[in-house]
């Protein structure tokens, strides 16, 4: 089995090698079997046959999943004849985590703004909800005055 990385679809359109790495990593992580393989490799180095043991798929299918992980740089394979020992490589996963972290900083700012708005509401101060209450009250007074005039 050839371990040469195959290009992803449309990879020739990607000009930034870092972007191509992220594409490969996220594609590899998109499958639950591959994520389970990575979890097992986080504990120790394993042979492909050992990796395949808990799965109800063929050894060949597990080997294909391992090759996707190798192409993404998430797994390193050392071959001795027909035996392939696999180990986890964390570098590409770190690159993906850093990319995700850039967006988590955006969301953290959004959550902080929301928390501030909720605190203002709880204190009964400002915000659009306070203005809405003030608009409702004058309308309620007009209704009461109409009722009094009808009596």
Image (spheres, grey):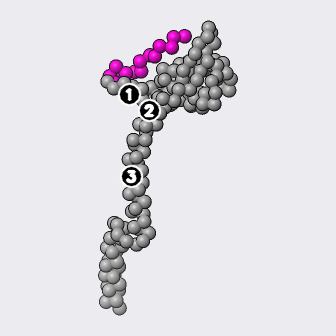
Q: Tell which of 103 and 126 is nearer to you.
A: 103
Give the left or right position of residue 15, taking residue 6 as reference: left
* Residue, disc 1: 18
Q: Is residue 103 magenta?
A: no
In terms of image quadrants, where is residue 36?
top right
Q: Is label 3 in a helix, a strand or a loop?
A: helix
Residue 83 at x, y percent in the picture? 63, 12
Q: Is residue 89 left or right of residue 112?
A: right
What residue lies at 44% left-to-right and 32% top-to-bottom? 95
Q: Nearer the viewer, mark 2 or mark 3?
A: 2
Please provide percent x and percent y for residue 131: 32, 70
Residue matched to label 3? 109
**CA gap, disc 2 and disc 1:** 8 Å
Q: Residue 122 placed where, x, y %?
A: 44, 69
Q: Earlier in the sequence, mark 2 or mark 3?
A: 2
Residue stretch rendered in magenta on the structure: 1-14
Q: Which residue is mark 2?
A: 95
């Amino acid at each position: 089995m050839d371990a040469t990385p195959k290009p992803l679809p449309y990879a020739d359109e990607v000009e930034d090698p870092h972007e191509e790495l992220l594409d490969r990593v996220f594609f590899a992580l998109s499958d639950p079997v591959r994520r389970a393989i990575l979890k097992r490799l986080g504990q120790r180095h394993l042979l492909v046959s050992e990796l395949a043991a808990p799965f109800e798929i063929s050894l060949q299918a597990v080997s294909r999943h391992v090759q996707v992980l190798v192409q993404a740089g998430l797994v390193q394979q050392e071959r001795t004849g027909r035996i392939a020992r696999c180990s986890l490589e964390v570098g590409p996963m770190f690159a993906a985590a850093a990319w995700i972290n850039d967006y988590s900083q955006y969301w953290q700012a959004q959550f902080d703004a929301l928390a501030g708005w909720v605190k203002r509401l709880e204190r009964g101060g400002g915000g659009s909800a306070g203005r809405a209450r003030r608009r409702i009250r004058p309308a309620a007074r007009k209704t009461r005055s109409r009722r009094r005039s009808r009596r």
